[in-house]
Amino acid sequence: QVQLVESGGGLVQAGGSLRLSCAASGRTFSSYAMGWFRQAPGKEREFVAALNQSGGSTIYPESVKGRFTISRDNAKNTVYLQMNTLKPEDTAVYYCAASRVATMTWTAYNYWGQGTQVTVLS
């Protein structure tokens, strides 16, 4: 069982940056691949980034590649999402999730946080 708690969301002007954090409970954090997803009102859940257990392999969709960076600190049981050059279309609730494999497919993730709101003002 893994419990995930996101933080770091907020309001930011277009072009600005935010760093989201996701703190995990339990001693098995390092055995999970981690992902970030987002969902805007009226839209489907969208993959944002994924990272394998060691942190050595990452996946990004084209929409955020070069702007977002996922990382993890297994000693702190925390995964991060650094978001730079934010755009209004990045506005959404952001969720972190844990899976046995790093993947873009949200159904592969077994554990989810409650989400944190990111709003990018134009």
Image (cartoon, helix red, strand yellow):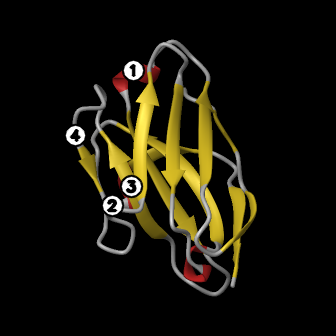
Q: Picture coordinates of residue 13 (x, y %)? A: 70, 72
Q: Mark 1 points at which residue?
A: 30
Q: Mark 3 points at which residue?
A: 49
Are discs 2 and 1 less than 8 Å apart at CB?
no
Q: Which of marks 2 and 1 is in front?
A: 1
Calculate the distance from the C-alpha at mark 2 to the C-alpha at mark 4: 16 Å
User: As displayed, is residue 102 above or below residue 117?
Assistant: above
The secondary element bearing badge 3 is classed as strand
Calculate the distance from the C-alpha at mark 1 to the C-alpha at mark 3: 17 Å
> Residue, x 70% and y 50% (percent of image)?
114
Are discs 4 and 1 less than 8 Å apart at CB?
no
Calculate the distance from the C-alpha at mark 3 to the C-alpha at mark 4: 11 Å
| Disc on the earlier residue, 1 or 3 | 1
* Quarter where residue 95 is shown: bottom right
Q: Picture coordinates of residue 93 (x, y %)? A: 66, 65
Q: What residue type is labelled 4?
A: Ser
Q: Which of marks 2 and 4 is in front?
A: 4
The secondary element bearing badge 1 is classed as helix
> Residue, x 35% and y 22% (percent of image)?
31
Q: Name the residue under label 2.
A: 105
Q: Mark 4 points at which residue?
A: 57
Q: Nearer the viewer, mark 3 or mark 2?
A: 3
Q: Which amino acid does label 1 sit on?
A: Ser
Calculate the distance from the C-alpha at mark 2 to the C-alpha at mark 1: 20 Å
Which residue, as the protein is rendered here, is positioned at the far front? 15
| Disc on the earlier residue, 3 or 4 | 3
| Disc on the earlier residue, 4 or 1 | 1
